[in-house]
Image (tube, rainbow, N blue to C red):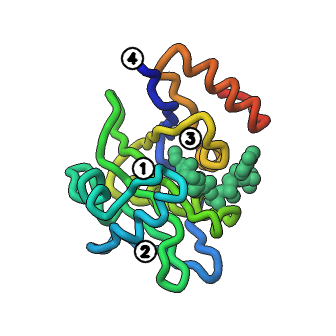
Amino acid sequence: MPERQLRMVRPDLEQLPVIAVPAEYELRTYRPGDEAAWCEVMNTGIGTDWTAEKCRRELTEREPFLPNGCFFVTKSEEAVATACAFDVQPEGLNAAQVHMVCAKPAHRGRGLGRLVTLAVLHYMREHDYTAAFLGTDDFRVPAIKTYLGLGFVPDYIEDSHRRRWSAVFAKIGERPS
Ligand SMILES: CC(C)(COP(=O)(O)OP(=O)(O)OC[C@H]1O[C@@H](n2cnc3c(N)ncnc32)[C@H](O)[C@@H]1OP(=O)(O)O)[C@@H](O)C(=O)NCCC(=O)NCCS
């Protein structure tokens, strides 16, 4: 069986930083018909074959999708970064998933990944979740740094993940928790 993705968890949703939207950008939630614009963001960093039809099938028309927990950062109406809350729980946690965090390359390096992830965490707290989790990959260093900075920690769901996390932390110059 192939190894599973790395998992991170934020064991509580206390002490979330305040949301600050950089000048020139706006933060809004999902509107019906956003799928094509969402695909344009995802195709720059989470796969390359997103179409509006696939986006509806795998995201917006699925039960765990929470329209008001799906955030877009826009600049002059163009969606440039996204993340959404997905109502799926790992065992034993009153959590939801932070899903599909991505920013268009021209807008990276400005903390927009942090912004959309934080917006999702605030949404979760306001909707009575008590924890958050996410799946990620070893090579996604900017994302992992973003998540660590927001209080996520590795959740070692497979023995091999300790080794994989050590390699990730060596890459980013931090120590595993
Ligand atoms: C995840 C993503 C949204 C973050 O973009 P961003 O908000 O612009 O983040 P930044 O590029 O500023 O990087 C975040 C942090 O990683 C650091 N970083 C970026 N590239 C790095 C690298 N190659 N090595 C080490 N650190 C790096 C940045 O310095 C920054 O650190 P800081 O918080 O201490 O300032 C963006 O990288 C992205 O869309 N990636 C592709 C999709 C993806 O991987 N999604 C995550 C799925 S789980």
What is the x, y in percent for residue 148? 63, 43
Q: What residue type is labelled 2?
A: Arg
Q: What element carries label 2?
A: strand
Can you tell which of label 3 and label 2 is closer to the viewer? Answer: 2
For label 1, the residue is 99
Q: Which of marks 1 and 3 is nearer the N terminus?
A: 1
Q: Which of marks 1 and 4 is nearer the N terminus?
A: 4
Which of pointers 2 and 4 lies earlier in the amino acid sequence? 4
Is residue 110 rendered to the left or right of residue 160? Answer: right
Label 3: which residue?
152
Please state which amino acid type lies under the numbered disc 3.
Phe
- Image quarter of residue 162: top right
Dots 3, 2 in contact, CB < 8 A: no
- Between residue 66 and residue 80, name the one nearer to us: 80
Query: Label 1 sits on what residue type?
Result: His
Q: Where is residue 6 in the image (x, y as percent from the top left)?
A: 51, 31
According to the picture, the residue beneath numbered tag 2 turns out to be 28
Residue depicted at x 36% and y 45%: 96
SS of the residue at dot 3?
loop
* Disc with the residue nearer the chain's start (3 vs 4): 4
Mark 2 Cβ and ligand 1 under 8 Å apart:
no
Q: Earlier in the sequence, mark 3 or mark 2?
A: 2
Front one among 142 and 105 = 105
Camera-side residue of 41 and 73: 41
Residue on which disc 4 sits: 1
Q: Distance between the residues labelled 2 and 4?
A: 40 Å
Secondary structure under tag 4 reads loop
Do callouts 1 and 2 mark residues in contact (Cβ within 8 Å)?
no
